[in-house]
Image (spheres, rainbow, N blue to C red):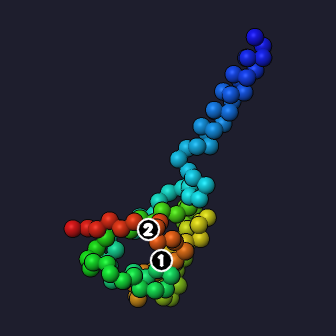
Amino acid sequence: MKKSLVVVSVLLMLLIALGATGTGCDAVRCGADVYLEGVTLGTIYQDDKPVQGLPTGKADIVLKVATDEVHVSSTDNGTIITLSPSGATITTGPNGMNISGVDPDDIEMKWRE
């Protein structure tokens, strides 16, 4: 009887530990999604290359990257937003917006009407 109580206790502790760590975060990404709202298309670059074939107008862009800290700095040419721990950067300035360090599969476009 004592042996089965120990086995049940160990299984219960394992379930609690796995439940505490399995809260929706995966091994690659954890943290908040980053929303860029009302972006005028035609001014977007990814890794310093213009994004081609997108409709013109405005869209909301969702970056699905590991983000638990956001660092904002400004230069004479614009603003730099760095997302940690992913290392992704969003640079905005007079020449538009550049998103770098983000896999294209982790960028979601939501078109505005």
The residue positioned 47% from the left and 60% from the top of the image is: 33
**Quadrant where the image shows the N terminus:** top right
What secondary structure is marked by label 2?
strand
Q: Residue at x 51, y 71 (%)?
A: 103
Residues 66 and 75: in front is: 66
Q: Amino acid at mark 2?
A: Ile
Q: Which mark is residue 107?
A: 2
Task: Give me the disc on residue 99.
Answer: 1
Tell me the residue at 27%/78% (across/down): 55
Crowding near the residue tagged with mark 2, few <14, some 14–19, many ≥20 C-alpha atoms within 10 Å: some
Which one is in front, 23 or 8? 8
Q: Secondary structure at mark 1?
A: strand
Horizontal and vertical percent for residue 7?
73, 23
10 Å crowding of disc 1: few (<14), some (14-19), many (20+): many
Q: Is residue 71 visible?
A: no
Marks 2,1: beta carbons within 8 A:
yes
